Amino acid sequence: MVLHHASTCIAFSGGYFMNIASIGLMVSILMDFCNLWVHYAKAFSGTTYTKTCYVFGGGMWIFWMYTRLICFPIVFAHSLFYQDYLVPGVSGSSQQTVFNILGVICLIILVLSIWWAYLITIMLYKAIKTGE
């Protein structure tokens, strides 16, 4: 979890400092959208509204899969392979190295998202199977 938060902070601040808004926005919007569903599910978990907690948990899983496994790779590939040609002074300069480092950090975030999607799917399957 520390690796995820460190990578997210570096990618967000690196995109901000290099004036490349697509990386910072990609990380902040796509990564944090499904966190809303997690907090709503946690808010209803200890109450008598267990069905509401299940709805928010299922919504978190759906939005996790969509934002982190579909949208994030598309925007990531666009930013890495197309954005550096649009930003003046990035291609062929020392900023290219920093841009590539941000690409590697976003790749780490993507691999962690795939692993967590697998773990969340297993956890959801067990919860549905046992009824808890």
Image (cartoon, helix red, strand yellow):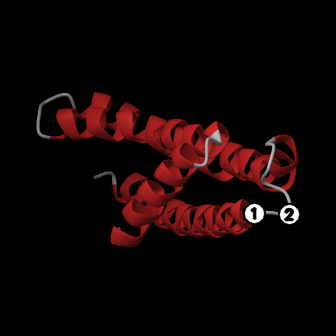
Residue closest to the eye, 6 or 64? 6
Secondary element under disc 1, as helix, strand or loop, is helix
Residue 87 pos. (x, y %)? 79, 42
39 vs 126: above or below: above
Q: On the image, numbered disc 1 is attached to which residue?
A: 96
Q: On the image, numbered disc 2 is attached to which residue?
A: 92
* Amino acid at circle 2: Gly
Whether residue 45 appears in this view of the structure is yes
Residue drawn at 49 percent across, 40 percent down:
28
9 vs 115: above or below: above
Residue 1 pos. (x, y %)? 35, 68
Residue drawn at 58 percent across, 48 percent down:
15
Residue 12 shown left or right of residue 19 in the figure:
left
Residue closest to the eye, 83 or 64? 83
Q: Which quadrant of the view contains residue 40? A: top left
Neighbour tally class for label 1: few under 14, some 14-19, many 20 plus, Cα within 10 Å:
some
User: How many marks on residues?
Assistant: 2
Residue 44 pos. (x, y %)? 20, 33
Neighbour tally class for label 2: few under 14, some 14-19, many 20 plus, Cα within 10 Å:
few
Asked if the residue at tag 2 contacts the one at tag 1, i.e. Cβ–Cβ closer than 8 Å, the answer is: yes
Residue closest to the eye, 63 or 82? 82
Residue 21 pos. (x, y %)? 62, 37
Whether residue 125 appears in this view of the structure is no
Secondary element under disc 2, as helix, strand or loop, is loop
- C-alpha separation, residue under disc 1 versus residue under disc 2: 6 Å
Residue 98 shown left or right of residue 57 in the figure:
right
Residue closest to the eye, 4 or 126? 4
Residue drawn at 39 percent across, 32 percent down:
55
Residue 33 shown left or right of residue 93 in the figure:
left
Residue drawn at 81 percent across, 51 percent down:
84
